[in-house]
Image (spheres, rainbow, N blue to C red):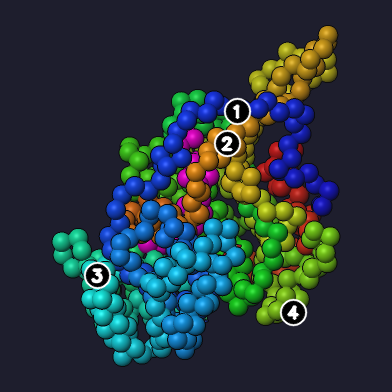
């Protein structure tokens, strides 16, 4: 399996450089230019991994840029009994290794950092939090606008939502000021029933427009670019259907293993962790119809419509359309790495899948009969997120006299990460006296001719929440339709009497179980 060619390496032999003239667009042209309401950002789970790795660096970067509310306070909340200085020191450690770290600017930023230790079960503690926030508002002039970010294990979402409601912190004032918004991290539920229950609990305290169900994939620049590519160009959309597209591949490969997240991952597995959310968003951006206007509700309507057209996966077809795997020991970057079952916190008999390859169909006028191949897994040979549109073959080869009965079809590759690019493969004549074809690529690199700052997905989502823009967040109906699709699949796998029939081992550092090879080949191009 490890010898399988990577989807990143199409068999192109030459590159046509798609360099465009530098149009001289000012680097600042697309940066946030509006004013953000003064506000307090309250992070629950402030002692955790997400806060240090993603949220605090994102907030610091926003502070350095123009996209920072004036004034703005950041309050870390967690059970750990830190003093304010300890919290500041931890956050300093999270930011100090960044390239743009500036000790002077850090001092200014850190002045706005406060900490509140809490017992999540105690109503009195939440009353204390309310008093703490009101006192900050009075001191800082943050006008009672509050962004609550749930960077805690999902088991706490309902408790925190309820407690905020009980003490009046979910209540918004009239007249635009005094807003309260809650950001809920994925996973949003672990099946359809729990997603519905979680939503019902949040709605006891918050209105729908106050709830932001985050999926950071939606905010990646190259993911946002998919709709621009499709709907701001006239040349792709006429071909974007079952008449011209043979199949679609979506891959989100990771080199990392489960790391320190066994507690969460053992309960989740790859279908809940990557497919029900990130992979479905990528699928929707390829599959959806154009909305009437580029506004949140209309874009989200179109995504949900495409989810509704997913052909249910199950019954005797399930094994033909889904391969699950779990990584065993192997080699990554020349170093031996343990298998999933040897990772700290993982049961030695664990049946949690860390890899899935899946074939889906979208039963509607545009896509009927076009297979969508999706694959994602941990401990694969490289970090790679790509969407690959495989066009159909030419209807007839003129070149059979040189032995070319079949000509490699065109592919449009949307590289999401690490390479952020768009590649179109096509056929040309190889220079020379005889007729020979060669496949070449036209490449556009996303940051080509761009010299301005680059916004990370978490920075973008934080700005959007502060602006109240829900375009890049899940809506509950979408969450539920996707769970309706995935819950029976996951249930069927988890209740299987013979686990070996549904979960296959693969060596870390390879492209998944050999059983998945046919699907991986179809996905990638080969
Ligand atoms: P952590 O495991 O680091 O937990 C965050 C904090 O929650 C901890 O510091 C701890 O703080 C508190 N906590 C942990 N366990 C419990 C418990 N059983 N009861 C009460 N409090 C607890 O989580 P992450 O920061 O990794 O993730 C937070 C959320 O973000 C999760 O929902 C995760 O799924 C999601 N997410 C995380 C990503 C990541 O890269 N880490 C990526 C995408 C989503 P204390 O003990 O001080 O209260
Ligand atoms: C998270 C998953 O949502 O996305 C992780 O919980 C995964 O398991 C991560 O590693 C991948 O995100 P990215 O941005 O690194 O591709």
Q: Are marks 2 and 1 in contact (CB under 8 Å)?
A: yes
Label 2, label 1: how far apart the Cα atoms are = 8 Å
Between residues 425 and 304, which one lies in front from this camera angle?
425
Label 1, label 3: how far apart the Cα atoms are = 49 Å
Categorize mark 2 by other alpha carbons within 10 Å: few (<14), some (14-19), many (20+).
few
Is label 3's Cβ within 8 Å of ligand 1? no
Q: Which residue in the protein does label 3 denote?
A: 141
Q: Position of residue 520 (x, y in %)?
A: 71, 47
Could you tell me which residue is drawn at 83 percent across and 15 percent down? 402
Q: Which residue in the protein does label 2 denote?
A: 448
Of badges 1 and 4, nearer the viewer stands 1
Label 4, label 2: how far apart the Cα atoms are = 47 Å
Of badges 1 and 3, nearer the viewer stands 3
Q: Position of residue 225 (x, y in %)?
A: 49, 41
* Label 4 element class: loop
**Residue sitting at the far top:** 433
In the picture, the disc for residue 19 is 1
Q: Earlier in the sequence, mark 1 or mark 3?
A: 1
**Quarter holding the C terminus?**
top right
Of badges 3 and 4, nearer the viewer stands 3
- Assign the magenta stretch its main secondary structure: helix
């Amino acid at each position: 399996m490890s010898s399988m060619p990577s989807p990143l390496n199409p068999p192109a032999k030459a590159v046509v450089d798609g360099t465009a003239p530098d149009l001289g667009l000012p680097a600042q042209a697309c940066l946030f230019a509006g004013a953000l309401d003064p506000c307090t950002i309250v992070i629950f789970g402030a002692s955790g991994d997400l806060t240090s790795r993603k949220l605090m660096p994102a907030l610091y970067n926003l502070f350095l840029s123009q996209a920072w509310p004036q004034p703005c306070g950041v309050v870390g909340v967690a059970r750990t009994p830190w003093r304010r200085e300890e919290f500041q020191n931890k956050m300093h450690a999270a930011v100090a290794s960044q390239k743009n770290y500036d000790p002077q600017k850090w001092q200014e930023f850190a002045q706005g950092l406060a900490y509140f230790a809490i017992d999540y079960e105690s109503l009195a503690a939440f009353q204390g939090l309310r008093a703490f926030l009101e006192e900050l508002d009075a001191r800082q002039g943050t006008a009672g606008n509050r962004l609550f970010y749930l960077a805690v294990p999902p088991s706490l979402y309902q408790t925190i939502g309820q407690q905020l409601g009980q003490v009046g912190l979910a209540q918004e004032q009239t007249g635009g000021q005094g807003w309260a918004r809650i950001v809920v991290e994925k996973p949003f539920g672990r099946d359809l029933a729990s997603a519905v229950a979680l939503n019902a609990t949040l709605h006891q305290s918050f209105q729908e427009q106050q709830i932001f169900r985050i999926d950071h994939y939606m905010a990646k620049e190259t993911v946002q670019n998919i709709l621009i590519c499709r709907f701001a160009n006239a040349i792709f959309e006429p071909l974007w259907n079952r008449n011209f597209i043979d199949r679609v591949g979506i891959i989100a490969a990771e080199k990392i293993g489960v790391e320190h997240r066994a507690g969460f991952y053992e309960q989740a597995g790859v279908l809940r962790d990557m497919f029900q959310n990130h992979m479905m968003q990528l699928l929707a951006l390829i599959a959806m119809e154009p909305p009437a206007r580029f506004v949140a509700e209309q874009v989200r309507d179109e995504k949900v419509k495409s989810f509704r057209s997913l052909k249910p996966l199950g019954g005797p077809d399930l094994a033909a359309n889904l391969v699950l795997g779990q990584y065993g020991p192997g080699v990554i970057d020349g170093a031996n790495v343990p298998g999933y079952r040897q990772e700290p916190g993982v049961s030695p008999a664990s049946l949690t899948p860390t890899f899935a390859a899946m074939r889906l169909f979208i039963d509607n006028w545009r896509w009927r009969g076009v297979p969508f191949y999706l694959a994602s897994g941990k401990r694969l040979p490289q970090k790679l997120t790509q969407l690959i549109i495989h066009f159909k073959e030419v209807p007839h080869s003129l070149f059979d006299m040189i032995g070319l009965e079949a000509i490699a079809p065109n592919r449009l590759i949307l590289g999401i990460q690490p390479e952020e690019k768009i590649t179109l493969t096509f056929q040309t004549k190889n220079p020379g006296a005889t007729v020979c074809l060669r496949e070449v690529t036209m490449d556009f690199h996303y940051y080509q001719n761009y010299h301005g700052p680059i916004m990370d997905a978490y920075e973008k989502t934080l700005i959007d929440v502060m602006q109240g823009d829900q375009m890049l967040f899940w809506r509950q109906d979408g969450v539920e339709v996707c769970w309706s699709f995935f819950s029976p699949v996951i249930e069927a796998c988890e209740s299987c009497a013979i686990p070996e029939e549904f979960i296959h081992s693969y060596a870390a550092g390879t492209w998944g179980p050999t059983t998945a090879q046919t699907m991986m080949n179809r996905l990638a191009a080969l």
